[in-house]
Each structure stands twice: as structure tokens, then as C-alpha cells.
């Protein structure tokens, strides 16, 4: 496990991140150019070596309900990789997606859902009922895929 100081040293190599000291010796790192409301990339990095990185938009990581992945036991390479992916997922370039028309999705039971872009969110409707809201098109389509729906 990397020490707190080693993790700080690695995180400080990302010039786009701004350090924000918080209580009990913990540190957050913000990505001020984030295209989303979410700006914290590294959350609650603690002197005991524990901490979290925002990975909700990345996939392939186990996250808590806030979209954070624990980095306590990460190696240097793993830490660099996850932070770079987190920054990339929040970048304006990654979030400047082309907005497609509303999409109808259907499952094997002929149930249909409608995917719409509204007020900065990707909403999934079952009839007139809101079934889910997502920050990105990729998150919404991943959800639909996992639920067994295909684009019609």
C-alpha cells in the first residue's frame, strides 16, 4: 500500500487538479474544468492512506453510492490510471456528446422504454413514468443494456 505522502506525490503530478485541504488532515483534489457539476476527483485522501476517486462515469470499477472507488490498496500505476480516467470522464471533450433524437428501446418481452435528453440529463421513461436519470448517454445505454433492452 502506498503511503499518504506517496499518494500525494502521485496526485500532484496532475497539474489540472487543485488541492483542497479539509478536516482531520484529509485532502480533496478538484478538477475545476469539469464539464459536470462534479468537480472532486480525489475525495477524502486520509493520512492513513485511505481515499476515493470518482469513477461513476468510467465503468469497470466497484463504486459506492456516490460513484467513488476506494484507492487504499492501489499501486502507483493503478492510481495514475484511475485518476487519469476520472479526469478524462469529467473533461469537456468527453462530455460534448452529440445529442441523438429520442430513442425507443425494447426487450425480449416486447416492453419498450424511451430514452430522452432533457435539461442536461438522459432520462429513461416507461410510458409516462420516469424509470431513471443519467448524467451521460453512455451511462443510460449501459443501464438499458444491463436490463436486457436493445435499441429499436
Image (cartoon, rainbow, N blue to C red):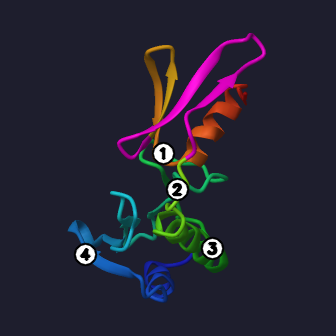
Discs 2, 1 touching: Cβ within 8 Å: yes
- Earlier sequence position, callout 3 versus callout 4: 4
Quote the CA–CA distance across marks 4 and 2.
20 Å
- Earlier sequence position, callout 3 versus callout 2: 2
Discs 1, 4 touching: Cβ within 8 Å: no
Spot occupied by residue 71 in the image (x, y as percentages of width and height): 53, 64
- Residue at the right extreme, as displayed: 108
118 sits left or right of 72 in the view: left
Instruction: Locate the C terminus and report the quarter of the image it occupies.
Output: top right
Disc number placed over residue 69 in the picture, else none: 2
- Total marks drawn? 4
Q: Residues within 10 Å of mark 1 (few under 14, many from 20)?
A: few
Quote the CA–CA distance across marks 3 and 2.
13 Å
Q: Secondary structure at mark 1?
A: loop
Tell me if I can see residue 43 in this picture.
no
Judging depth in this view, the residue of 7 and 141 nearest the camera is 141
Instruction: Locate the N terminus and report the quarter of the image it occupies.
Output: bottom right
Spot occupied by residue 39 in the image (x, y as percentages of width and height): 35, 64
Judging depth in this view, the residue of 117 and 14 nearest the camera is 117
Start-end of magenta stretch:
100-121
Q: Residues within 10 Å of mark 4 (few under 14, many from 20)?
A: few
147 sits left or right of 70 in the view: right
Judging by the rendered image, the residue that carries numbered circle 4 is: 21
Judging by the rendered image, the residue that carries numbered circle 1 is: 64
- Earlier sequence position, callout 2 versus callout 1: 1
Amino acid at each position: 500500500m502506498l503511503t499518504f505522502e506517496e499518494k500525494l506525490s502521485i496526485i500532484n503530478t496532475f497539474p489540472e487538479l487543485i488541492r483542497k485541504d479539509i478536516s482531520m488532515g484529509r485532502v480533496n483534489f478538484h478538477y475545476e474544468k469539469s464539464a459536470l457539476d462534479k468537480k472532486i476527483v480525489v475525495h477524502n485522501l486520509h493520512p492513513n492512506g485511505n481515499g476515493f476517486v470518482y469513477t461513476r462515469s468510467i465503468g469497470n470499477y466497484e463504486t459506492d453510492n456516490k460513484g467513488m472507488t476506494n484507492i487504499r490498496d492501489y499501486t502507483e500505476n493503478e492510481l495514475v490510471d484511475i485518476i487519469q480516467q476520472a479526469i478524462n470522464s469529467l473533461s469537456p471533450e468527453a462530455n460534448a456528446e452529440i445529442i441523438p433524437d429520442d430513442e425507443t428501446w425494447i426487450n425480449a418481452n416486447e416492453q419498450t422504454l424511451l430514452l430522452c435528453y432533457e435539461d442536461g440529463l438522459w432520462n429513461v421513461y416507461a410510458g409516462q413514468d420516469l424509470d431513471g436519470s443519467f448524467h451521460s448517454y453512455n451511462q443510460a445505454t449501459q443501464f438499458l443494456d444491463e436490463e436486457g433492452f436493445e435499441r429499436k
